C-alpha cells in the first residue's frame, strides 16, 4: 500500500482523535443564560451543585466606590431561576461570602464578617435550605481574616482554610502578609481544633476519605533563581492536624494557584503564570500523582481569540469532568493600564471555559464575549448532569440590576 493511502486503522485513529479534541474555538451548545443579584455591584466567587438539582452560589455585593461590602448566598433551581438570596452582614461594615459546601440540612458558608467599620474577621455561617441564617461563628484572632475554602469530612464535620492577622480588611486575591490557618469543626460551629499552616494563606481545602488526609493549596513567595517569585503549594495534614507532606510547584516565573481538586490518583491545580519578561498572565494547569510529584503542566493563552499581545488570560477554578478531563473557569482581556488601542474589543473582558483531556491537551474553548454590552469573566465552573457545565460570571449586563450581577451560563458538551 502506498504512503498516499493511509490504512483503515490510521483513519480510525484520526477520527477518534478529532472527536476527543475538537478545534479550540468550536461552538458549544448553550442550554440557558440568565443573571441575578442585588441592586449593588455583585461579584461571585464559587458555588456548588445542590442535591435537589439546583445550585447555591456565594459572593459579595456593594457600591463600586465604597470601602464596605455585604456577602450574599443565592440559590437557583436547575433552570437558573432564582429561589432565594440572603445578604450577610450589616450596612457600613465589610462582609464577604467566599466559599460554600452543602450539608445534610443546608449549607456551610465561609468568608469574612465585619465587626467594626475598620475590622473584619474570619467567619462561618450555617444557612438553611430556604436561605435562613441558622448560626454564625466568628473566629477569635488579631487584625483581619477570612475563610477561603471548605470541604466536608463526614456527615457531621468539615474542614476550613484561610488566613488571619492581615492588615487588609478586604479579602485580596492572595493574602501575603498574614497567617494561614486550618481548622476542623462540627456542623454546629464548634471548632474541634485549629492550627497555623506554614504559609500566609490557604486558598482551597480538600479531604480524601480513602486516605483520611486533608490537603490545602495556595500561593507562596519564594526566593530562588536569583529573584523573588511566586509558586503554588500543596500541604497535607492528618484529620487530627499533624503535618504530613509539603510540595511546591513552579520555577523562576510568577505562578499563582487559586483552585485545585483531589483525583483518585493525585491532584490537579489551576491558576495562572506570568514570565518576568512579558508580564502577561497565561492560564496554568498542573497535574501531580498521589504523592504530590509533578506529572505535567500546561499553559493556555489568547483564550478569547484576541489579537493584542497585552491580553491577560486568568483562571480561578478547575474541576474534573466525567471522562477524566478538566474544565477551567477563566477570564481573558486587557487590564486598563495596559490598553494601547482604546477602541479594541479586547479591552472588554471575555468569560471563557476551557475543556481539556486527561493530559491537559486542549479540546475546546467556549467564549462568552459581549464587548458591546460590557465585561464578563468566568470565576467558577460547576460540572453537573451529563456533560453540562454551569459557568459563574461577573457580568456587566446579565441580570436587570445595575451595575453588575452574577451571570449564569449553562453550557453542554453534547
Image: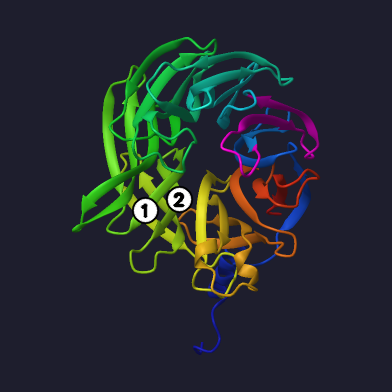
Q: Where is residue 39 in the image (x, y as percent from the top left)?
A: 75, 38
- The image's mark for residue 255 is 1
Tell me the magenta residue range: 62-88
Relative depth, front residue between 214 and 405: 405
Q: Where is residue 44 in the image (x, y as percent from the top left)?
A: 62, 40
Q: In which quarter of the image is residue 35?
A: top right
**Among the two numbered marks 1 and 2 on one chain, the one whose residue lies closer to the N terminus:** 1
Tell me how far mark 1 sits from mark 2, CA to CA.
Answer: 7 Å
Q: Is residue 330 above or below residue 264?
A: below
- The image's mark for residue 234 is none
Q: Position of residue 115 (x, y in %)?
A: 52, 20
Label 1 packing within 10 angstroms: few (<14), some (14-19), many (20+):
many
Write the residue at 57% across / 60% down.
332
- What residue sits right under mark 2 in the picture? 271
Write the residue at 58% across / 27% down.
93
Q: Is residue 211 visible?
A: no
Say whether residue 353 is magenta: no
Q: In which quarter of the image is residue 55?
A: top right
Q: Residue furthest left?
A: 226
Write the residue at 61% across / 61% down.
365
Amino acid at each position: 500500500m502506498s504512503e498516499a493511502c493511509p490504512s483503515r486503522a490510521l483513519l480510525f485513529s484520526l477520527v477518534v482523535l478529532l472527536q476527543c479534541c475538537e478545534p479550540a474555538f468550536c461552538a458549544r451548545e448553550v442550554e440557558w443564560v440568565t443573571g441575578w443579584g442585588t441592586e449593588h455591584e455583585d461579584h461571585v466567587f464559587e458555588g456548588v451543585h445542590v442535591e435537589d438539582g439546583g445550585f447555591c452560589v456565594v459572593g459579595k455585593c456593594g457600591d463600586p466606590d465604597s470601602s464596605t461590602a455585604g456577602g450574599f448566598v443565592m440559590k437557583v433551581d436547575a433552570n437558573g431561576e432564582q429561589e432565594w438570596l440572603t445578604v450577610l452582614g450589616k450596612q457600613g461594615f465589610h462582609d464577604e461570602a467566599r466559599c460554600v459546601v452543602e450539608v445534610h440540612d443546608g449549607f456551610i458558608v465561609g468568608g469574612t464578617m465585619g465587626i467594626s467599620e475598620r475590622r473584619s474577621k474570619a467567619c462561618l455561617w450555617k444557612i438553611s435550605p430556604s436561605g435562613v441564617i441558622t448560626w454564625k461563628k466568628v473566629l477569635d484572632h488579631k487584625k483581619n481574616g477570612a475563610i477561603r475554602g471548605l470541604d466536608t469530612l463526614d456527615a457531621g464535620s468539615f474542614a476550613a482554610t484561610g488566613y488571619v492577622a492581615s492588615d487588609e480588611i478586604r479579602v485580596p486575591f492572595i493574602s501575603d502578609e498574614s497567617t494561614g490557618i486550618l481548622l476542623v469543626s462540627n456542623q454546629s460551629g464548634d471548632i474541634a481544633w485549629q492550627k497555623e499552616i506554614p504559609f500566609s494563606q490557604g486558598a482551597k481545602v480538600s479531604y480524601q476519605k480513602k486516605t483520611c488526609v486533608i490537603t490545602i493549596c495556595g500561593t507562596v513567595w519564594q526566593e530562588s533563581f536569583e529573584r523573588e517569585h511566586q509558586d503554588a503549594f500543596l500541604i497535607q495534614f492528618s484529620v487530627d492536624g499533624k503535618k504530613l507532606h509539603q510540595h511546591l510547584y513552579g520555577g523562576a516565573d510568577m505562578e499563582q494557584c487559586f483552585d485545585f481538586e483531589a483525583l483518585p490518583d493525585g491532584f490537579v491545580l489551576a491558576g495562572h503564570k506570568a514570565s518576568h519578561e512579558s508580564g502577561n498572565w497565561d492560564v496554568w494547569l498542573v497535574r501531580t500523582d498521589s504523592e504530590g510529584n509533578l506529572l505535567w503542566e500546561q499553559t493556555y493563552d489568547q483564550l478569547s481569540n484576541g489579537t493584542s499581545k497585552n491580553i491577560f488570560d486568568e483562571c480561578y477554578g478547575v474541576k474534573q469532568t466525567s471522562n477524566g478531563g478538566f474544565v477551567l473557569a477563566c477570564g481573558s482581556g486587557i487590564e486598563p493600564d495596559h490598553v494601547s488601542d482604546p477602541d479594541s474589543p479586547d479591552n472588554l473582558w471575555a468569560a471563557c471555559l476551557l475543556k481539556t483531556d486527561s493530559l491537559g491537551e486542549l479540546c475546546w474553548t467556549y467564549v462568552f464575549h459581549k464587548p458591546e454590552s460590557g465585561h464578563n469573566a468566568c470565576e467558577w465552573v460547576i460540572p453537573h448532569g451529563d456533560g453540562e457545565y454551569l459557568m459563574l460570571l461577573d457580568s456587566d449586563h446579565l441580570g436587570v440590576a445595575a451595575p453588575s450581577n452574577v451571570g449564569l451560563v449553562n453550557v453542554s458538551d453534547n
